[in-house]
């Protein structure tokens, strides 16, 4: 049996006392407020097709607060009627096969009892996740014909970065798989049986960072006389195994930090663990302090991502761009479709190009301010967690209606590309197996 303490922590109540985003038992919007049921022809439930989703989420974290942007985003969709229900089930902390078996059973019974017609396995690539395939098969057989989706947020794909079994197993049992990169990762997931593999670019948390941008709050704001020319936020990677892709990306990060330290000296602010001995070292910061830390510099160096798969970037560049400080990041293939290069950020292929881009911003403060403002505005307009939760629900709703009516699903427009991108043409790379 699942230990009572874990069951209580993970399913019943999972946020701090007094927090105004406490995990709810359930949320419902009265059907009459949105016309939730469409009585046009449909094969299930006597010809009715649900027009909004009642969403269940297996949420990455020990509490819903660990994924605060997504949690709050889904709650807002309940409030405006875009979801008829929402219940998060955080899964970090489950330890034994029995824990997982009872957790899966609890979720399946919840979906049966409440009529939940949508399941999202969020960021489902933790190494301790038990095989979800029997659970997903059980959910798929529920009478409401739920739409099932899995999402991935980490850099997988190349030979040394194979996605874990939890992700490939969940993808093979899902109607949709959302990913933060395509290319090699999408190919691996498709070969494992995933369908409707859909780019869902990384984003910044509204609740933690959406109100921290002074450049958006005050059009006349100017970051005068910052302490540093350039900052980088990131720890020194550990590990000595060349067969691990993080070994190589970590080595590139360390080499870049060494060269930036040599170039800018004490005008380079280096924040993170493991940089002892470097004159630029400033120590670690809290995750929520990224925006204010970036405001202490003229330029932000984004660093090297853990993957070169198409579109991949972590959420850090999106978070840090909200500072209004211009970001120089690594030129992963097709990442220039997310923010416009030369207008909303600068991209570089190696450390020499990175230093040249930083120097160009330091010598042209007006251009740097323009890039910083444009970047902050772009993230606020299309790269927040609230944008992603709304798009995820729109896609899941489309696939659910198509599933229960027997028609072909058509992916709603991906709304995170910048205005210069031909979205229809980009779908050839951003979507697979639709």
Image: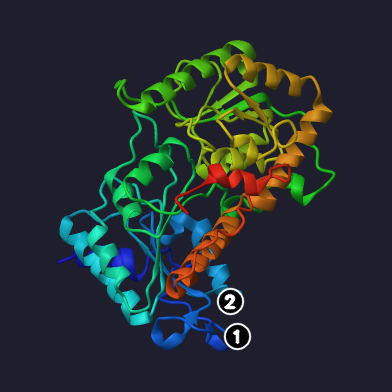
Residue for badge 1: 33
340 to 18, vertically: above or below: above
Q: Earlier in the sequence, mark 1 or mark 2?
A: 1
Label 1 and label 2: CA atoms lie apart by 7 Å
| Helix, strand or loop status at disc 1 | helix
Which of the two residues, 109 or 234, is positioned nearer the viewer here?
Answer: 109
Label 1 Cα neighbours within 10 Å, binned few <14 / some 14-19 / many ≥20 = few
Q: How many marks?
A: 2
The x, y position of residue 220, in whole percent, is 85, 44
Q: Identify the residue at image location x=44%, y=71%.
A: 406
Q: Identify the residue at image location x=72%, y=37%.
A: 344
Farthest residue to the front: give it. Answer: 407
Residue for badge 2: 81
| Quadrant of residue 245 within the rendered picture | top left
Q: For residue 256, say whether it is visible.
A: yes
| Helix, strand or loop status at disc 2 | loop
The coloring applied to the image is rainbow
Which of the two residues, 405 or 235, is positioned nearer the viewer here?
Answer: 405
Quadrant of the image for the N terminus?
bottom left
Q: For residue 30, say whether it is visible.
A: no
Which of the two residues, 292 or 417, is positioned nearer the viewer here?
Answer: 417
Callout 1 touching callout 2 (CB < 8 Å): yes
Query: Is residue 182 shown left or right of residue 353?
Result: left
Q: Which mark is residue 68?
A: none
The x, y position of residue 119, in whole percent, is 39, 66
Q: Identify the residue at image location x=30%, y=23%.
A: 243
Query: Is residue 195 shown left or right of residue 318?
Result: left
83 to 210, vertically: above or below: below
């Amino acid at each position: 049996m699942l230990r009572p303490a874990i069951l209580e922590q993970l399913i019943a109540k999972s946020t701090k006392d007094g927090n105004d985003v406490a995990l709810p038992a359930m949320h419902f919007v009265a059907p009459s407020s949105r016309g939730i049921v469409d009585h046009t022809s449909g094969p299930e439930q006597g010809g009715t097709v649900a027009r909004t989703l009642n969403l269940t989420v297996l949420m990455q974290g020990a509490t819903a607060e660990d994924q605060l942007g997504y949690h709050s985003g889904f709650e807002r969709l309940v409030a405006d009627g875009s979801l008829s229900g929402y219940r998060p089930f955080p899964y970090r902390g489950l330890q034994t096969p029995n824990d997982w078996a009872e957790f899966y059973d609890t979720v399946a019974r919840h979906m049966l009892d409440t009529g939940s017609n949508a399941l999202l396995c969020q960021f489902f690539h933790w190494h301790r996740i038990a095989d979800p395939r029997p659970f997903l098969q059980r959910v798929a057989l529920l009478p409401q014909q739920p739409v099932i989706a899995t999402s991935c947020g980490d850099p997988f794909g190349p030979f040394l970065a194979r996605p874990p079994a939890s992700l490939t197993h969940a993808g093979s049992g899902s109607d949709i798989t959302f990913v933060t990169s395509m290319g090699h990762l999408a190919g691996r997931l498709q070969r494992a049986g995933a369908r409707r593999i859909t780019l869902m670019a990384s984003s910044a948390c509204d609740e933690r960072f959406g109100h921290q941008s002074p450049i958006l709050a005050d059009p006349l704001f100017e970051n005068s006389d910052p302490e540093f020319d350039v900052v980088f936020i990131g720890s020194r990677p550990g590990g000595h195994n060349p067969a691990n892709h993080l070994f190589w990306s970590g080595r590139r990060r360390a080499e870049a930090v060494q060269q930036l330290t040599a170039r800018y000296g004490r005008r380079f602010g280096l924040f993170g663990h493991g940089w002892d001995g470097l004159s630029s070292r400033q120590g670690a910061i809290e995750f929520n302090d990224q925006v204010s830390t970036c405001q202490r510099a003229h330029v932000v160096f984004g660093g090297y991502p853990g993957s070169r798969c198409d579109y991949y970037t972590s959420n850090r560049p999106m978070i840090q761009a909200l500072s209004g400080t211009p970001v120089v990041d690594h030129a992963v293939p097709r990442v220039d479709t997310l923010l416009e290069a030369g207008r909303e950020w600068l991209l570089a292929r190696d450390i020499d190009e990175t230093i040249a881009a930083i120097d160009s911003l330091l010598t042209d403060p007006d251009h740097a301010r323009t890039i910083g403002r444009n970047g902050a505005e772009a993230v606020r307009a299309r790269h927040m967690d609230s944008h992603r939760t709304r798009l995820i629900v729109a896609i899941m709703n489309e696939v659910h209606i198509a599933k229960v009516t027997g028609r072909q699903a058509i992916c709603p427009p991906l709304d995170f590309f910048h205005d210069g991108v031909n979205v229809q043409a980009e779908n050839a790379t951003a979507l697979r197996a639709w």
